[in-house]
Image (cartoon, grey):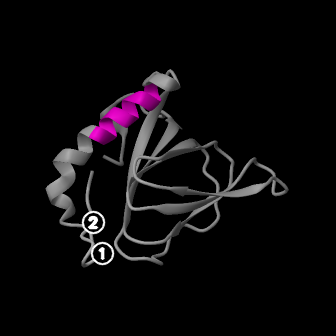
Amino acid sequence: QIEVDNDTNRFPSFASHNAELIPQVALVRKTIEEKHLISRTKHRVNCHLFASLVAGSDGLNFHLDTEDTYIWQVQGSTLWTVQQGPSEDDVIEEFTLEPNDMIYIPKGWRHYPTITGPRCSVSFSIEDNLFDSVEERSDI
């Protein structure tokens, strides 16, 4: 677990923790692949790292994703507002994710994070695999 310096309210150098965080991300990704019976020929689990070093930093506006998504809170806490369904009439609830908490957001459900302080989280989205090989991908 990556610790925040309580005196300065900052993360230490992120580079010094890459070796610790990367295997954990790989383990969570593998767990999601197994849970959803992901066949890499049809789908892939894509990962994105989000880090905020101060409270009140801009997050994403209320939006929806076109993939099923998991959010894993690595460090700090994040307030999530989630509309519980695809209709604008569906109930809106709030969840605070603490370190090692995870939330599942089905595709089409609107949501947004409120950044309350230094934090680090990783999102895992289950995407259609549109490529036959690594060479065809432009994002790596």
Mark-to-mark CA distance, 2 and 1: 6 Å
Tell me if residue 46 comes above or below residue 131 in the rendering. Answer: below
Residue 60: give x, y in percent of width and height.
Answer: 54, 66
Vertical placement of residue 60 versus 137, above or below: below
Residue 109 is left or right of residue 11, and the answer is right
Sequence-wise first label, 2 or 1: 2
- Main SS type for the magenta part? helix
Please tell me whether residue 58 is drawn above or below residue 19 in the rendered image.
Answer: below
Amino acid type at circle 1 is: Asn
Q: Residue 39 in the image: x percent, y percent?
A: 46, 21
Contact? badges 2 and 1 (CB < 8 Å)? yes
As drawn, 113 above or below 65: below
Residue 38 visible from this viewpoint: no
Mark 1 Cα-neighbour bin, 10 Å: few <14, some 14–19, many ≥20: some
- Judging from the image, what secondary structure is the residue with disc 1 in? loop
Q: Which residue corresponds to the image point at 27% horizontal and 72% vertical from the top-left?
A: 6
Residue 89, image x and y in percent? 85, 56
Any part of residue 40 in sight:
yes
Q: Amino acid at mark 2?
A: Val
Label 2 Cα crowd, 10 Å radius (few <14 / some 14-19 / many 20+): some
Which numbered tag is attached to residue 103? Answer: none
The region drawn magenta spans 24-33
Residue 75, magenta (yes or no): no
Farthest front residue in view: 6
Could you tell me residue 109's position as x and y percent?
A: 68, 50
Disc 2: which residue: 4
The residue that mark 1 highlights is: 9
Name the residue: 74% across, 58% down.
92
- Taking the view exactly as shown, the residue that stands out farthest to the left is 16
- The residue under the point 40% across, 55% down is 121
Secondary structure under tag 2 reads loop
